[in-house]
Image (cartoon, rainbow, N blue to C red):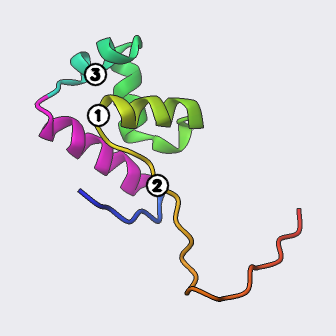
Amino acid sequence: MKQLLSTAGQLGQVLQSARRAGKLSQTDLASRLGISQSRVSHMELNPGSISADQLLALVSSLGLELVVQDKRPAGADSPTVEW
């Protein structure tokens, strides 16, 4: 499954779909991650609350991988970012 995400809400939907496709209950996934079922539910419903470490553990537990890809065309100048 390859999914382009542009909102946190889409992330929650993808995580839930992947869990269901793997025939895992929230309790099963929680057990794999060493967290509570209610935390899994919260992460699916409010994915903006997930830390980077939690997201990486979650996608790994679901047999997924997280890919960050440059969306600019090849050869385009790098944008200047001010912090």
- Given contact means CB atoms under 8 Å apart, are the residues at marks 2 and 1 in contact? no
The amino acid type found where label 1 is placed reads Leu
Residue at label 3?
Answer: 29
On-image quarter of the N terminus: bottom left
Classify residue 70 as left or right of residue 60.
right
Residue at label 1?
Answer: 62
Mark 2 lies on a secondary structure that is loop
Residue 59 is situated, as x and y percent measured from the top left of the image, at 38, 37
Earlier in the chain: of badge 2 and badge 1, it is: 1
The amino acid type found where label 3 is placed reads Leu
The stretch of residues the image draws in magenta is: 8-23
- Given contact means CB atoms under 8 Å apart, are the residues at marks 3 and 1 in contact? yes
Foreground of the two, 38 or 26? 26
Classify residue 17 as left or right of residue 52.
left
Cα–Cα gap, marks 3 and 1: 8 Å
Report the magenta stretch's main SS. helix
Residue at label 2?
Answer: 67
Q: Which mark is residue 74?
A: none
Q: Please identify the residue farthest to the right as the structure is shown.
A: 83
At horizontal 54% and vertical 76% (from top left) the residue drawn is 71
Cα–Cα gap, marks 2 and 1: 15 Å
The correct choice, above or below, for 47 with respect to 73 in the image is above
Residue 25 is situated, as x and y percent measured from the top left of the image, at 18, 24
Q: Nearer the viewer, mark 2 or mark 1?
A: 2
Earlier in the chain: of badge 3 and badge 1, it is: 3
